[in-house]
Amino acid sequence: MSDYWWWKNVLSKDKIKSLNNFIIKNFDSKENPKNEALGINKEKIKFADVYCISWGKVKKFLQDPHDKSAWAIQQIFGFDIHLINNVDSVMLNIYDSKSNGSYDWHTDGEIGKNYDIKATALLNVSLDEYTGGDLHFFNRGDYVVKELKEPGSLVVFRSYFNHKVDKVLKGERRTLVMFFTGPKFK
């Protein structure tokens, strides 16, 4: 069983630039640093600017990555999922070397909902090269997901896998995040 599924060159550089410009001009909200992810000891573990935008606004850019992700989640991982709808949010995460952009070990999920986040899709929408910012998984040991490093690459994984983003040492790493939910795990 594969820990993740990926595609190369899902978006061209021109589409990545257009998507970034659109989100920065039309986002619905910016994540409040007070609401950012906290570690087990309640310390801040995420250092990124996060722009939330409704799927309805960006689906014209992201339908193909969405469809590829949904296929992998259903066919490879075997999960029942709800497809993303127009009022769901996607997030643009900007990890900048100037602000020590990183995200320590975590899993993706929400407590107390009537659904579970089944899978996470990450699309590299970086505009320029960056150093650091590697995505790590911890499943039978710590390893780097090298396939996400190239702009336009898409990685899909089970949201309950422990993962992190290394500190960006130079430049800016941008990823677009889509969460796929489904009926609660039993």
Image: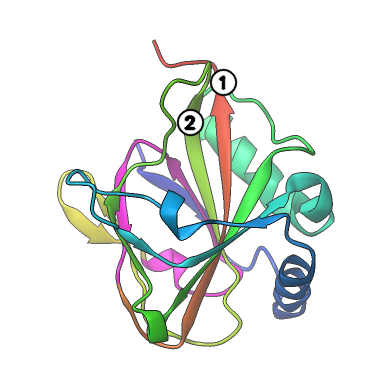
Residue at 73% from the left image edge and 78% from the top image edge = 17
Q: Which residues are magenta?
A: 146-166
- Image x and y of residue 21, in percent: 75, 75
> Quick one: 185 or 46, which is closer to the camera?
46
Residue 123 % position (x, y): 57, 60
Specify which label sits upstream in the sequence, 2 or 1: 1
Q: Are marks 2 and 1 in contact (CB under 8 Å)?
A: yes
Residue shown at the point (50%, 21%) measured from the top left: 113
Picture quadrant where residue 168 is located: bottom left
Is residue 28 among what the camera can see? yes
Q: Determine which of the numbered discs, if any, sits on residue 182 in the image.
A: none
Q: Residue 162 in magenta?
A: yes
Which amino acid is tagged 1? Asp
Q: Please determine whether, in this image, residue 131 is positioned above or below residue 53.
A: below
18 up-or-down from 76: above or below: below
Q: Is residue 72 magenta?
A: no
At mark 2, the secondary structure is: strand
The circle on residue 80 is 1
Q: Position of residue 142 (x, y in %)?
A: 18, 56
Residue 7 appears in the picture as rendered: no
Answer with left or right where residue 68 lies relative to residue 112. right
Q: Position of residue 158 (x, y in %)?
A: 41, 38
* Separation of residues labelled 2 and 1 (CA atoms): 8 Å
Query: Which residue is situated farthest in the top direction here?
Result: 186
The structure residue drawn at horizontal position 75% and vertical position 35%, both measured from the top left corner, is 85
Question: Considering depth in this image, is 151 or 24 the residue closer to the camera?
Answer: 24
Q: Nearer the viewer, mark 2 or mark 1?
A: 2
Please name the residue shown 56% across and 20% down the image: 80
Residue that label 2 marks: 118
Q: Amino acid at mark 2?
A: Lys
